[in-house]
Amino acid sequence: MEARSTSAIEGTCVGMEDVLKADFEDASDISSDVAEVRNYVRIAEIATTAINDRPVTVALLEYLQGILVSGTSSHTTQAGQVRTTDAFIGVRTANVEDARFVPCPHGHRLRDGLLDWEGWINQAGPEMHLMTRIAVGHYQFETLHPFNDGNGRLGRLVMLLQLMRAGELTHPVVALSPWLESRRREYRDQLFEVSATGVTLRIAEGLIGYPMLTITWAAKRYGVTYQTVSNAVSKLVALGLLRQYGEGSYDRVFINDEALRVLVG
């Protein structure tokens, strides 16, 4: 059930009966969608066994990702390793400007971020509840988006591994993804909302030094997409911290009146 639901969240929808029937079929007779779900079953079995003797590591996830995409269209030269190209998420076109979210660029920043993430999720202490650490760690992993495919499924598997590593589960008997599947839109929106809220705060802080902006200018300044800034500006307008300056409809200018008043004395 976990394998079927975690795949469905990513758009690979197969019936439970098809997954079970595949145990009695030749590999050549199994559809690519069913094979993809079965790949997840395999990596979950490997990971939940390995977690008894080792923490969650980037190396483990690289190994699992290679198996997860095996035999699929994502089985490219980047399979089994952290991506070496940039990625953008939630697009209806091929233009990065239309992306809903742009993850960390590839290279040393992505690798360093992953190593920081690895160290952080394996920490244990009373300062943060385990479930909070799991939720924050999941957001961080999905934001880094380290692989060319499989990030959602691997990220949800990591949550289960954290529960097992912490001793809260002896066996992988909790299926998290069916619950998330029934709330798929809210799940994705809330992950996005955390990123958008962070940008909103950065924009608000920046208004202290420069009280005017356009969405295009802010997107370049803060290194995020046009849509992310547009959502943030809408929130700041609703809060009364920005208002549109002038009547233009293209690349509108927004202003914080209070910050401007302080600057001009």
Image (tube, helix red, strand yellow):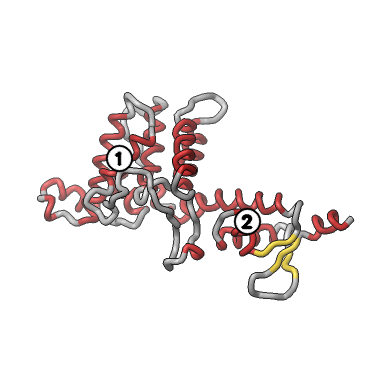
For marks 2 and 1, the one nearer the N-term is 1
Classify the position of the C terminus by image quarter: bottom right
User: Label 2: how many residues lie within 10 Å, few (<14), some (14-19) or many (20+)?
Assistant: few
- Camera-side residue of 118 and 178: 118
Q: Residue furthest right?
A: 265
Q: Residue drawn 40% across and 43% down?
A: 155
The residue under label 2 is 221
Where residue 42 appears, as percent x and y from the top left, is 24, 40
Q: Quadrant of residue 215?
A: bottom right
* Picture quarter with the N terminus: top left
Nearer to us in this view, 190 or 111? 111
The CA distance from mark 2 to mark 1 is 36 Å
Q: Residue at x 33, y 40 (%)?
A: 62
Residue in the foreground of this view, choosing between 210 and 52? 210
- Name the residue rendered at 35%, 35% in the picture: 59
Farthest-out residue, front: 108
Examine the image and state in which quarter residue 89 appears: bottom left
Helix, strand or loop at label 2? It is: helix
- Left or right: residue 106 versus residue 226 is left
Question: x, y (%) of residue 93?
Answer: 43, 68
Report how many numbered discs are placed on residues in the image. Answer: 2
For label 1, the crowd category at 10 Å Cα-Cα, with few meaning under 14, some 14 to 19 and many 20 or more, is: many
On screen, residue 209 versus residue 16, left or right, reads: right
Depth order, front residue of 50/250: 250
Amino acid carrying label 1: it is: Leu
Q: Name the amino acid, label 2.
A: Arg
Q: Which mark is residue 107?
A: none
Numbered tag placed on residue 64 in the rendering = 1
Q: Nearer the viewer, mark 2 or mark 1?
A: 2
Q: Position of residue 34 (x, y in %)?
A: 22, 53
* Helix, strand or loop under label 1: helix
